[in-house]
Image: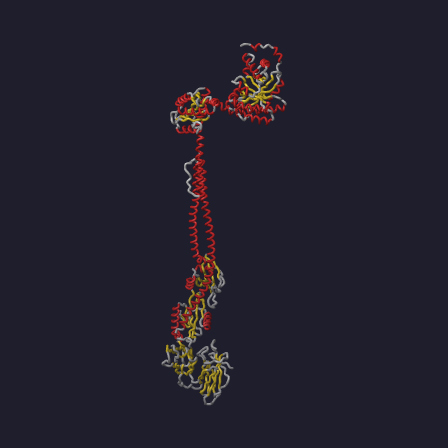
């Protein structure tokens, strides 16, 4: 039970701690990730921007490099051409018009500098020889105009360089004069501008170079360092930026920075030299940097994770430890302190926890002592006894287990007469004796409360328990020496056993209690439980609950019996009597439930009900102008109730009724049970204005000394004397003496039980003040009272006076 | 001015009639100018007799000196068969050569005066250069007549000693578009009073 209630909260506690840890870690990681991410984005942006800018710069520089490269190529070509042109042998061959030699020299020199084209033109611009063999062959398709133009320029400037398109191939040409020493012809040399030049460019500058023919015809790629596919894509990418300005193109799924360099020299060939720089390639080195950055980020995250794990652990572990400690305390385990070796806050908390643990442990010990031990005798109390009993039953499933219960006779009286200190000493002596009787270690004695003791005899059945009970009884009956006084005690002992009489501890205890009360009632000493005893107590229980229901449901009815002044027959008041109309059983005689109610204490509830109704009735009569005194019966229990006067006062106040309208009737025995207390209550009631009457006077052992001190107003002679007043001489004497006694003490005297007219007259003559009885009226409901009063005719005194009363003094 | 269409593009304007001196030697003064009218120095002007055979060579010493990495004169006019010395007065060697059809020769790296002079036995124009120094250029115009001269700074040249008669007047200049095609015209020379002015069509870039 304890476990199941603690467990869920424990798991919740641990879960929440874990989530605290998770939150700490998450927060740290999220912050770090945010910072790193932001840094990454910023750096990435910067890298991109930087890469693009550097691509632009590279292209610009590349443009210059290209120009220079082209110039160098042209220079190299020109140099080669010049070497040829100034070669004496070549010139000799030219001079001697030795075509074969000319061609051979052209071929030789062309190879020397790697020129694709090497030609000789005469001064009048006729082609005279070529490295390609046959003079003026079919592959001599150089645009004559282009050559003419170049030669013209060479004539003016000493040499000329430029490009030419030949059969869809691009060539860089130079023209130098052949002098001997005046100009005798022209050497034209040319490199094919092909992939190797583009590759040179790429090797030099990391830039790709593409030559595109832009002529009127179809645009085409002449040469490129790009893969053919990409070069074709560049061609397809549409118009290129203006020559000299850089731009960007998305080519073949990649971003390229592009710069159109244009052509060197003055040639107006429709050819674009285009430089490309792959931006992704330019970014690539930075990608490595970014990779490093990511690696650093991941490493940082890992370090942070470990760090935050460690931190979170440092924070949550003591909390977890404290939580576990608290759970242990909650489960009642105080022996182990919380082991938290933190300093500062956590340490303080742990110390406070341990301090609390000690405090709780100590107080729980005290509570346990109070809860399970009787402080007076040092014996186990009822709770512990019940627990032990339960354990004994549970431990030996098939073993019997007997219980004895005993209650001292007249202990209350002893207590009252000899004082509580004496009573306590007596109880301690009793406890000692009980323990001394027990032979076995497993047997145990407990004080259940007051003078009620119980003995547990595990493993013993009724037959075995009975002799022990007898021994106990014997031990108890030995005279006791307490505080120097010898005292005889007796007790009723009940015996019951598991499993014979009950299958659980609580029922067994109630059964043995029933047996004990029966034993006391019958003065039987030792009595073993029997179902027949219990049936009676069952009835009692059901009666009690029915009575309670009756009060709640107004099944009780208030009846009134008129009280009349015997002198003139006038009605002076009424006595209220309670009647019970049971919904099933019908009319229940007062004798069937009033004594029971008095026994069980329920009478106080009834009294309250009666008083309440009576006050309400009084209020109604007050309104109707009916001036009747109302008498209400109080029981012993009522007198013991210290709050009774207050309660009555509230009732009166609520209904605006004077206390003087009421007469409270108390039996002699009620007063004599606890005269001190009764007297105190009666004094207070009297002070409030209630009139008090001693009921059933003469039946108890009333001490006249007490009577004298009571603040009573009237005596009520018991009906047992009144009914016999005409036939029994003793009764007549008692009645007359009582009347005299009452009058002499200044009290009004009331007679109840007037059953005929003779008694009426007798009492009237004896001087009795007030009477009530069936002769006048039986108790009737309030509704019938008015009618009765209207019809009531008191008996005529004269008739009676003249009538002989032979029975009055008859001897029998 | 009178224009004459000839196979080669020379235009000769004849202004004044020649002065005859009977059987006595006659003389002719010719002024050479370019198309623009500027006078031309170093133009070879010579007369080839149409009516008689030209007299043979009268040998004489002709030198084309190399000094300060230059040829001593730009143009040298000689009669066919004339031997020409190429003394090197510089302290560096020269390699004088000609690849012209009229005379192919080569004086390989030498100092001082070569052992043998070069004999120019065929009429025509020869360009002489130095294989070491590209800038060194000299022209030798070989004519087939003893009556020749070279225009002075004023573009004038006087030729004398020839008998009256019909002559072909030829004017050559290294600036001609075709060095093998001197301007020519037929003139009658009589006496000493003759003078002639010739305008030459030159390559662009030559004065």
Q: Quadrant of residue A492?
A: top left
- Residue in front for this viewpoint, A573 or A417: A417
Colour setting:
secondary structure
x then y, percent, for residue A86 = 40, 73
Asked whether residue A138 appears in the rendered view, the answer is no
Q: Is B63 drawn above or below residue A443 in the view shown?
A: below
The quadrant holding residue A103 is bottom left
Residue B84 lies, in percent from the top left, at: 39, 82
**Can the viewer see residue A289 in this picture?**
yes
Identify the residue shown where x is 46% and y is 55%: A43
Question: Foreground: A609 or A638?
Answer: A638
Q: Quadrant of the N terminus of chain A?
A: top left
Vertical placement of A469 versus A2: above or below? above
The picture quadrant where one finds residue A564 is top right
Give above or below for A322 relative to B83.
Answer: above
Above or below, comparing residue A702 to residue A209 in the picture: above
Q: Is residue A577 left or right of residue A314?
A: right
Q: Residue furthest left?
A: B115
The image position of residue A597, as x and y in percent, is 52, 23
Numbered circles on residues, count = 0
Q: Say whether residue A567 is left or right of residue A213.
A: right
Of residues A398 and B145, which is closer to you in this image?
A398
Q: Position of residue A14 (x, y in %)?
A: 44, 41
């Amino acid at each position: 039970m304890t476990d199941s209630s603690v467990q869920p909260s424990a798991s919740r506690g641990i879960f929440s701690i874990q989530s605290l840890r998770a939150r700490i870690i998450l927060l740290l990681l999220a912050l770090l990730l945010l910072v790193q991410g932001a840094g990454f984005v910023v750096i990435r942006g910067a890298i991109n921007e930087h890469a693009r800018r550097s691509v632009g710069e590279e292209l610009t520089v590349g443009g210059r490099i290209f120009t220079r490269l082209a110039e160098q190529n042209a220079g190299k070509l020109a140099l080669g051409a010049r070497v040829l042109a100034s070669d004496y042998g070549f010139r000799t061959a030219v001079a001697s018009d030795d075509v074969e030699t000319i061609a051979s020299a052209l071929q030789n020199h062309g190879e020397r500098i790697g020129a694709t084209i090497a030609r000789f033109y005469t001064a009048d611009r006729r082609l005279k020889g070529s490295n390609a063999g046959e003079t003026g062959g079919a592959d001599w398709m150089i645009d004559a105009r282009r050559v003419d133009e170049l030669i013209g320029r060479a004539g003016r400037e000493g040499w000329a360089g430029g490009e030419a398109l030949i059969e869809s191939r691009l060539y860089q040409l130079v023209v130098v004069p052949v002098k001997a020493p005046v100009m005798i012809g022209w050497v034209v040399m040319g490199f094919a501008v092909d992939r190797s030049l583009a590759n040179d460019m790429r090797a030099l500058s990391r830039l790709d170079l593409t030559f595109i023919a832009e002529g009127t015809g179809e645009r085409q790629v002449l040469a490129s360092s790009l893969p053919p596919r990409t070069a074709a894509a560049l061609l397809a990418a549409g118009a290129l930026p203006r020559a000299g300005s850089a731009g960007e193109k998305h080519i073949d799924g990649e971003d390229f920075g592009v710069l159109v360099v244009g052509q060197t020299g003055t040639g107006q060939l429709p050819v674009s030299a285009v430089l490309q720089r792959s931006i992704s390639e330019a970014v690539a080195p930075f990608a490595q940097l970014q990779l490093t950055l990511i690696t650093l980020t991941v490493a940082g995250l890992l370090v942070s994770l470990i760090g935050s794990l460690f931190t979170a652990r440092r924070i949550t572990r003591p909390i977890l430890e404290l939580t576990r400690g608290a759970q242990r305390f909650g489960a009642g385990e105080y022996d182990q302190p919380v082991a938290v070796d933190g300093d500062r806050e956590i340490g303080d908390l742990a110390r406070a926890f341990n301090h609390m643990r000690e405090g709780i442990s100590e107080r729980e010990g005290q509570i346990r002592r109070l809860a399970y031990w009787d402080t007076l005798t040092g014996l186990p109390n009822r709770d512990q006894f019940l627990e032990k009993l339960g354990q004994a039953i549970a431990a030996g499933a098939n073993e019997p287990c007997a219980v004895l219960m005993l209650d001292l006779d007249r202990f209350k009286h002893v207590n009252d007469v000899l004082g509580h200190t004496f009573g306590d000493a007596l109880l301690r002596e009793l406890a000692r004796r009980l323990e001394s009787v027990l032979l076995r270690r497993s047997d145990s004695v407990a004080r259940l409360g007051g003078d009620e003791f119980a003995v547990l005899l595990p493993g013993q059945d009724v037959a075995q328990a009975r002799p022990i009970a007898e021994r106990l009884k014997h031990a108890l009956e030995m005279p006791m020496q307490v505080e120097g006084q010898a005292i005889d005690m007796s007790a009723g002992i009940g015996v019951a056993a598991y499993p014979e009489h009950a299958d659980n501890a609580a029922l067994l205890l109630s059964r043995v209690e029933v047996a004990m009360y029966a034993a006391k009632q019958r003065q039987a000493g030792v009595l073993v439980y029997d179902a027949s005893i219990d049936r009676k107590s069952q009835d009692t229980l059901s009666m009690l609950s029915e009575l309670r229901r009756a009060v709640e449901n107004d099944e009780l009815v208030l009846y009134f019996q008129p009280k009349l002044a015997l002198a003139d027959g006038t009605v002076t008041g009424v006595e209220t009597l309670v009647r019970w109309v049971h919904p099933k059983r019908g009319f229940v005689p007062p004798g069937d439930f009033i004594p029971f109610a008095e026994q069980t204490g329920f009478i106080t509830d009834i009294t309250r009900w009666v008083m309440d109704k009576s006050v309400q009735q009084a209020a109604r009569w007050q309104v109707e102008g009916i001036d009747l005194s109302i008498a209400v019966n109080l029981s012993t229990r009522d007198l013991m109730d210290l709050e009774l006067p207050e309660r009555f006062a509230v009732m009166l106040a609520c209904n605006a009724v004077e206390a003087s309208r009421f007469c409270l009737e108390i039996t002699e025995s009620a007063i004599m049970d606890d005269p001190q207390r009764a007297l105190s209550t009666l004094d207070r009631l009297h002070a409030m204005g209630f009139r008090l009457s001693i009921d059933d006077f003469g039946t108890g052992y009333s001490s006249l000394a007490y009577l004298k001190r009571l603040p009573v107003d009237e005596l009520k002679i018991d009906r047992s004397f009144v009914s016999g007043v005409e036939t029994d001489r003793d009764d007549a004497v008692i009645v007359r003496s009582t009347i005299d006694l009452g009058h002499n003490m200044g009290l009004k005297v009331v007679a109840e039980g007037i059953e005929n007219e003779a008694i009426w007259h007798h009492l009237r003559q004896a001087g009795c003040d007030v009477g009530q009885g069936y002769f006048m009226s039986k108790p009737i409901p309030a509704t019938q009272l008015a009618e009765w009063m209207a019809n009531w005719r008191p008996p005529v005194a004269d008739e009676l006076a003249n009538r002989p009363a032979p029975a009055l003094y008859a001897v029998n | 001015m009178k224009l004459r269409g000839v196979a080669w593009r020379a235009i000769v304007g004849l202004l004044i009639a020649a002065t005859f001196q009977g059987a006595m030697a006659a003389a002719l003064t010719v002024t050479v100018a370019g198309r623009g009218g500027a006078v031309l120095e170093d133009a070879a002007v010579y007369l080839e007799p149409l009516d008689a055979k030209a007299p043979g060579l009268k040998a004489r010493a002709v030198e084309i000196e190399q000094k300060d990495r230059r040829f001593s004169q730009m143009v040298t006019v000689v009669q066919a068969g004339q031997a020409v010395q190429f003394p090197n007065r510089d302290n560096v060697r020269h390699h004088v050569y000609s690849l012209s059809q009229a005379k192919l020769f080569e004086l390989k790296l030498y100092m001082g005066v070569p052992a043998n002079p070069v004999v120019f036995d065929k009429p025509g124009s020869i360009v002489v250069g130095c294989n070491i120094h590209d800038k060194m250029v000299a022209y030798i115009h070989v004519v087939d007549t003893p009556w020749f001269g070279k225009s002075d700074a004023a573009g004038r040249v006087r030729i004398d000693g020839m008998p009256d008669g019909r002559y072909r007047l030829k004017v050559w200049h290294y600036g001609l578009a075709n060095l093998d095609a001197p301007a020519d015209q037929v003139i009658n020379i009589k006496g000493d009073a003759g003078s002639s002015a010739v305008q030459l069509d030159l390559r662009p870039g030559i004065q």
